[in-house]
Amino acid sequence: MPKKIRLGILGGGGDSLIGVLHRVASHINDNYQITGAVFNPDFESNMAFAKEIDVPLNRIYKDFDTLIEEELKLPKDERIQVCSILTPNFLHYPMAKKLLDNGFHVICEKPMTTSLDEAKDLQKSHEKAGTVFALTHTYTGYPMVRQMREMIKAGALGKIHKVDAVYYQGWINTIIHDKEKRSSVWRLDPKKAGISSCMGDIGVHAFNLVEYTTGLKVNELLCDFNYLYEDNKMDVDGTVLIRMSDHVKGVIRGSQVATGEENGLAIAIY
Ligand SMILES: NC(=O)c1ccc[n+]([C@@H]2O[C@H](COP(=O)([O-])OP(=O)(O)OC[C@H]3O[C@@H](n4cnc5c(N)ncnc54)[C@H](O)[C@@H]3O)[C@@H](O)[C@H]2O)c1
């Protein structure tokens, strides 16, 4: 039986939202082994969580730089082969870049980077590295999404005239209206989340699906964002008019203040 792929995890600790989903997904086909990690910036929590989920403690590192340094000392057939980056957004770019530059494969959570310049630079590192860079735009894996893409490709809809993608959540209502609470969440902190909350967090999925299902490219945008409060620097709701290739027009709508919505993602292609 071939050896399992040696997977490293960055972020995704016991306190995180997405960590468990990556761990479960990596085991669905039983071909990954979590070999090392920095689950948490706090070393004690890091070790405690590793114990809880049974990851070898000698491969739990105090920080990302130490993980790279120590893993590179190991023979290639023992070393972590691919790392998943499941940290808050601002760490995606520096972590992905250093991993690629040191010959690792990368599975990176969205948003890929927090600026276009970073994205362009990462692309260069990727081209040079020749390893895999996978961005987890999760929804492209859903059978219905694949079905849409195949039907559109086969011409079942004929010429596309309009697209409408919506991703609505309401969770930020419990935080955004309280000044203290809204200053304590990383998704509302530009230093940690980057330039956007709503569009960077969930609008990117809708955007990705519009391009993925139609096979067309978004060429132009017109955005109207809502921040709700003067001191809040991050969009929590927005509407984006889009112009795509082949003269297709449409709209992407995103919200984190849509009361009652949990994870309301829908895409319509006409
Ligand atoms: N693809 C999807 O559908 C999807 C869904 C949810 C979240 N995400 C993305 O996943 C990422 C994490 O989101 P989340 O909701 O799990 O966040 P979270 O705050 O729940 O968890 C973040 C984790 O990163 C750890 N961490 C923070 N700084 C670290 C560091 N320097 N080194 C190592 N670990 C560190 C924290 O301890 C925590 O375990 C975000 O970029 C988010 O956009 C993607």
Image (tube, rainbow, N blue to C red):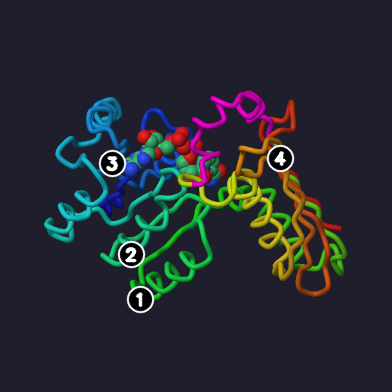
Residue 148 versus residue 168: which sits nearer the camera?
A: 168
Ligand 1 visible in quadrant: top left
Label disc, if present, on residue 100 of the rendered structure: 2
Can the viewer see residue 169 in this picture? yes
Q: Is mark 3 within 8 Å of ligand 1?
A: yes
Q: Residue at position x 51%, y 41% from top? A: 189
Looking at the picture, how far across and down is residue 2, in whole percent?
A: 27, 54
Compute the Cα span from label 2 to label 3: 17 Å
Q: Disc 4 residue type?
A: Ser
Q: Residues within 10 Å of mark 2 (few under 14, many from 20)?
A: many
* Residue 181 highlighted magenta (yes or no): yes
Q: Disc 1 residue type?
A: Lys
In this picture, which residue range is highlighted in magenta? 169-190
- Residue placed under numbered mark 1 in the picture: 128
**Looking at the rendering, which quadrant does residue 178 occupy?**
top right
Please tell me which of labels 4 and 3 falls first in the chain: 3
Please tell me which of labels 2 and 3 falls first in the chain: 3
Q: Disc 2 residue type?
A: Leu
Looking at the picture, how far across and down is residue 140, in whole percent?
A: 61, 53
As drawn, 219 above or below 267: below
Looking at the picture, how far across and down is residue 70, in whole percent?
A: 15, 52
Q: Residues within 10 Å of mark 3 (few under 14, many from 20)?
A: many
Please tell me which of labels 3 and 1 falls first in the chain: 3
At mark 2, the secondary structure is helix
Q: Residue at position x 70%, y 69% from top? A: 217
Label disc, if present, on residue 255 of the rendered structure: 4
At mark 1, the secondary structure is helix
At mark 4, the secondary structure is strand
